[in-house]
Image (cartoon, rainbow, N blue to C red):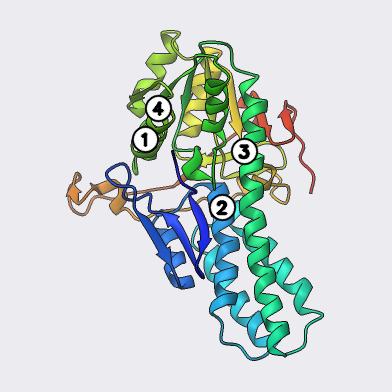
Amino acid sequence: MIPPTIEWCDGAVRLIDQRRLPAALDILTCRKVDELCDAIRTMAVRGAPALGAAGAFGVALAAARSEAETVDELLGDVGDAGGRLVATRPTAVNLAWGIGRAMEAVNDVAVRASDSPADLERVRVAALDAAEAVARADVHCNEAIGGHGAALLDDGARVLTHCNAGSLACVGYGTALGVVRRAHDDGKGVSVWVGETRPALQGARLTSWECQQLGIPATLVTDTAVGSLMAGGRVDAVVVGADRIAANGDVANKIGTYTLAVLAYHHGVPFYVAAPTSTIDAASPDGASIPVEERDPDEVTSFAGVTVAPEGVDVRNPAFDVTPARLVTAIITEHGVHHPPFTFHP
């Protein structure tokens, strides 16, 4: 029903162009690293796990496109590409993680390689093999997350989610929406409150579309409506994804997540975070150490080419906020359900 978000095909990175959804399911083909960087920066591909795969495939693409005649030259081309890729979205730790996985595979082969054409090809193959492994593992992790998370939801649970943490945010299946998907497939009769997620409307455009494709009952609401929904007893759980989780359990996720966590805490609604362990950054001791990406003000002052604010108004457009660990009921990973106090080690 939903094709892979990102994959390798005929020497290029092929991905769903999420800028076009829900109007059209278009496929974007990136044959150059700069094209993939632009796709990441403009959110043609987005979501922490999907960005991990994008980073790894970007390294593979750099290796495949390099005309280097020596191992050192090839490593230079790949390293330069990795630097450009990681700079596109600094908050999402999976991007750097995926790049690192592919670079590690490249270096492992390169250290034993000569400058022969055959050895250079082995280095290129190692990069692609590593990227393919990252992509395969992502789907398996998400399916496991779905299983662990679905067990937390009661029959008929009304689940509020934010942004898009479904198949489109991953290579496949989904994290937060994967939890709902598994509960739905298990016959639990769950439904979803879809927060629109301003300013880019990933909830309205992407999560609503995914729920339709999967046959999961879903109702779209404005971001400002969720407090009244909780006050009215119409939300049984909040399940969100994450772009980076610090060692102490602080969670960086799409802007507006912190607001949901505060509302959930006030109304006694469980607040769950679903993410693979690759999203946990044990090198970040807490949320204060997580860099928060600032995006183009145009995302706030206009939408779909229509201006919605007066010219010259000051704008701040942080892409993420940080939810303190004390507001998180549990963190769901492929290894199980983690309860506070959270302590994640390297």
**Residue 195: x and y, percent?**
39, 29
Q: Is residue 106 left or right of residue 236?
A: right
Q: Nearer the observer, disc 4 or disc 2?
A: 4
**Which residue is at a point 61% across and 53% down the rendered structure image?**
135
Q: Which residue is tagged 4?
A: 194
Q: Is residue 100 left or right of residue 264?
A: right
Residue type at mark 3: give it: Asn
The first of marks 4 and 2 along the sequence is 4
Q: Is residue 170 left or right of residue 111?
A: left
Dot 1 falls on a residue whose secondary structure is helix
Q: Which residue is tagged 1?
A: 209
Dot 4 falls on a residue whose secondary structure is strand
**Which residue is at a point 32% across and 53% down the rendered structure image?**
297
**Residue 155: x and y, percent?**
56, 10
The first of marks 1 and 2 along the sequence is 1
Q: Nearer the observer, disc 3 or disc 4?
A: 3
User: Is residue 221 shown to the viewer in this render?
Assistant: yes
**Residue 217: x and y, percent?**
40, 20
Residue type at mark 1: give it: Trp
The first of marks 3 and 4 along the sequence is 3
Q: Which residue is tagged 2?
A: 291
CB contact under 8 Å: marks 1 and 2 = no
Residue type at mark 4: give it: Val
The first of marks 3 and 1 along the sequence is 3
Q: Which residue is tagged 3?
A: 142
Q: Nearer the observer, disc 1 or disc 2?
A: 1
Q: Residues within 10 Å of mark 1 (few under 14, many from 20)?
A: some
